[in-house]
Amino acid sequence: MVKVAELLATGRTMSFEFFPPKSDEAERALEKAVGELAPLEPSFVSVTYGALGSTKERTREVVIRMNAEQAFPCVAHLTCVGHTRSDLVALLDEYAANGVENILALGGDPPADGSDPGGDFTYASELVELVRAHPGGFGVGVAAHPEVHPRSSDRSGDRERLARKLQDADYGITQFFFDVADYVRMVDELEALGCTTPVIPSVMPLINVAGVRRMAGMNGSKIPAHLEAELDRRADDPDAVVALGVEVATQLCSELLEAGVPGVHLYAMNRSASLRQIYDNLGLHRGR
Ligand code: FAD
């Protein structure tokens, strides 16, 4: 298998993100989606990790299986808040033993009730250091927040910390956003700090109104007024909401590709239809 940095070095990547299934039925849906998306020949895929390790086993199983069975590498998301060093090293050992070569090193969120999560880590940069020191020789990506991380009180401090984190990593992947100007501004601010590590923008084709509002609120992603109005207008028509998600994501991808981004990371949300439609709309050929 190959590392994401090697793929980025050869040209623009197109990648898809999945989440670990919580039931047998959800597992079958994921398998179906992966089977239907594989012909698009993504450069790589990634699988998320539940808050505070809540999906640790499922993420591990899906990553190891997809990485072994598919023609593209699978990146394992890994969060460090609330984990002990030995827990994380054990998981990295298992990934290395099973041929997984790519880790997305994340902070993760502390418990919503404000309680102390315990564990040995506070910030993603500490996990980057741990993964780098592991004999598995993993490729390491990190998260970036174009609209500034929701827990950051000052923009310049957030950007300086992000630049330092990116300089120790191979690449970044962003939180989703709806205004390309936010991504471009972040890249400019990083460059002004001397950081040129590639940062791949994420695009989320929304599929339901409550879901996008909840996720945007949690991640500090602004929903523009015109999109809010469209969401209100289509709220009682699920198919029209999915179609809106495809339309908005197609436009975002098109502007990002035009801007010369290093890659685009699309949230598949364990379904295939929206991504296949976006590929058709953009006239993207397989494997590009
Ligand atoms: P960090 O880089 O640690 O940053 C968190 C905050 O701490 C920021 O405000 C930062 O400015 C600040 N900070 C960093 N270092 C320091 C320091 N030394 N001193 C003071 N402040 C500091 N969550 C999951 O639970 N599972 C997932 O699979 C997952 N996947 C994600 C994928 C992507 C692409 C993105 C963008 C996010 C993902 N998240 C996931 C969410 C992520 O865990 C949260 O956004 C989390 O709040 C921060 O993660 P981070 O890696 O950016 O953390």
Image (cartoon, grey):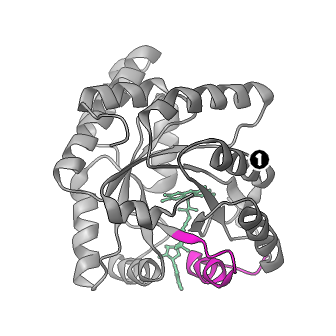
What is the x, y in percent for residue 74?
58, 52
Nearer the observer, 120 or 214 = 120
> How many badges with numbers are in the image?
1
Secondary structure category for the residue under label 1: helix
Does the magenta segment cover residue 125? yes
- Neighbour class for label 1 at 10 Å: few (<14), some, many (≥20)? many
Which region shows up in magenta?
116-140
Nearer the observer, 25 or 210 = 25
Nearer the observer, 115 or 188 = 188
**Which quadrant holds the C terminus?**
top left
| Residue 111 in the image: above or below residue 178 | below
What is the x, y in percent for residue 280?
30, 26
Q: On the rendered structure, is 205 left or right of 77?
A: left
- Report the amino acid beneath label 1: Arg
What is the x, y in percent for residue 195?
31, 81
> Image quadrant of residue 28?
top right
Q: On the rendered structure, is 261 left or right of 89?
A: left
**Residue 87 appears in view:** yes
Disc 1 under 8 Å from ligand 1? The reply is no
